[in-house]
Every structure is written in structure tokens, then in C-alpha cells.
Amino acid sequence: MPAAEAVALFLDNACIPVDVRDDGQAGRIPGSFRLRQATFDDDLRDVFDFLSPADPLLVYGDGNLLVAAAVAGRLQERGFTDIRLLGGSLAAWEKAGGQGDAAGPAAPDDREAAGD
């Protein structure tokens, strides 16, 4: 999905951003959570309480769509049906007018502390 369309969906509160990048990469789409390919099962277990297979997900990474597509495929295997891939990286998102957050994606413990 083109970054401009993804930003519009996000601004309409019509998607939940999912960051598939490895640890240590700066920035994020606000409100995103992490589902890394290498630790997918553990990461999904951490967010499963607040995530429904019917939720619309916007999967993004470092611009390598192979990694994002692999994570999207694993989500589909687990029953998630509304999955979109961001075309490009966080830089494309910001270039299209999307806001970035300096912090990395929220860890499940951070969400619980914030009451999410």
C-alpha cells in the first residue's frame, strides 16, 4: 500500500501499525507494537490480549517487503484477515506526512503500565 494511503488510514483510526523491524532501529509509527520475524510467536503472545484477528493491521518495516510479507503471512496463518503492507519504510511514511515517534514500539509491559 502506498505510504500516503497508509497515512490516511491511520489518521482515520482505521488500522493498527505493526513494526516488524529488529530491535535497535530508531523511530516508529505512534501506537505501533512490535512483531519481529525471529521472535514472532513470543511477540504475538505478548499482544494477544488486546489484538483481535479482525483488527485491521498495517505492517511496516525497514523497506524490505520480504520481511514484512513474511510476518503478514504468519499473521494470516493465525486467522488475521485484514493486513496491509506499507510500501517503503518509516522514512516513506514520514515523507507522506505521517508522524513519527522517536521512541521504539511499545513493549507489552509499557502498554500495561499505560493502561492500554
Image (cartoon, grey):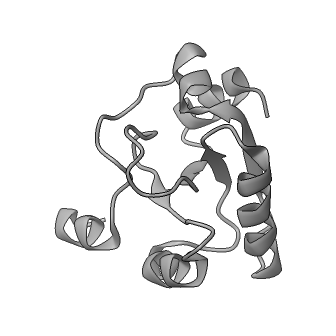
User: In the image, what residue occupies the spot 76% across and 74% down?
Assistant: 74
Left or right of residue 42: residue 96: right
User: In the image, what residue occupies the spot 64% across and 63% down?
Assistant: 55
Percent position of residue 111, x then y: 29, 65
Left or right of residue 16: residue 53: right
Q: Is residue 46 above or below residue 107?
A: below
Question: In the image shown, does 75 or 66 lie closer to the viewer?
Answer: 66
Residue 63 seen in the figure:
yes
Q: Quadrant of residue 108?
A: bottom left
User: In the image, what residue occupies the spot 68% across and 21% down?
Assistant: 4
Task: Return the residue found at the far left.
Answer: 113
Percent position of residue 105, x then y: 38, 53
Q: Quadrant of residue 100?
A: top left
Percent position of residue 60, x then y: 63, 45
Q: Which image quadrant: the C terminus? A: bottom left
How many numbered marks appear? 0
